[in-house]
Image (cartoon, helix red, strand yellow):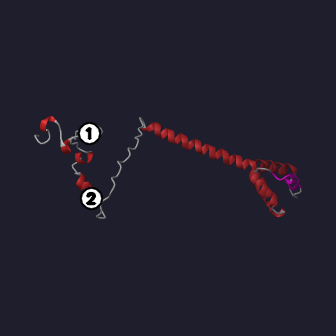
Amino acid sequence: MQTIFSNSLATGAYSKGANDPLPIEVTEEVSPIEEQGHTIDEITESGNTNGGESSGSKPPLAKKPKMTVEDPNIAMVTMIGQSLGNLATAITNMMNAFNSDGEIPEELYDTMMSIPGFDTAQLDHYYAYLCDHPPQARAFYKLPLSSKVIWVARYIKEHL
């Protein structure tokens, strides 16, 4: 101490100027790694697999936000509700697409009335069925006459 404070002033390498930073008191702190029983040297050695040392230090891992659910049933109901909402939307879109091209050929009635061998009441009944089912009406309209006779006969046998 006599070397540092001769005549009660700091001299030489131990003196500070007016613009020099104030000294900081260094205390020894225990890092979270050392609390777990590992030293920093052990962690560094186990992390270096290529034998070289890194010139930079790794930033600490970001903390992930924890999501807590008070009741797991609420989370389940929420997920099911969202899934059912998506399903309902898909069904609605499918029905809109189905109904948009659900037009019946304009000449279908005249074509049906020209089919020989059936009563007008039977043909009207089958025409009403085809109006309720546009995809089948379009398929029926494209058939040749012999196939149309078979389709009408089959319908009459099953329903009348």
- Residue 107 or residue 44, whichever sits in front: 44
- Residue 78 place in picture, x, y as percent: 50, 39
Count of numbered tags: 2
Image: magenta residue range = 104-113
Residue at x 54%, y 40% (from the top left corner): 81
Amino acid type indicated by mark 1: Gly
Quick one: label 1, few (<14), some, or many (20+) residues within 10 Å? few
Q: Is residue 48 above or below residue 32?
A: below
Can see residue 4?
Answer: yes
Quarter occupied by the N terminus = top left
Q: Is residue 76 above or below residue 134?
A: above
The secondary structure that most of the magenta stretch takes on is: helix
Q: Is residue 67 above or below residue 48?
A: above
- Residue 15 or residue 100, whichever sits in front: 15
| Quarter of the view holding residue 117 | bottom right
The disc placed on residue 46 is 2
Helix, strand, or loop for circle 2? helix
Callout in the foreground (1, 2): 1
Amino acid type indicated by mark 2: Ser
Residue that numbered label 1 is attached to: 17
Q: Is residue 12 left or right of residue 88?
A: left
Quick one: label 2, few (<14), some, or many (20+) residues within 10 Å? few
- Residue 97 place in picture, x, y as percent: 71, 49
Q: Is residue 142 above or below residue 86?
A: below
- Residue 49 place in picture, x, y as percent: 30, 63
| Quarter of the view holding residue 15 | top left
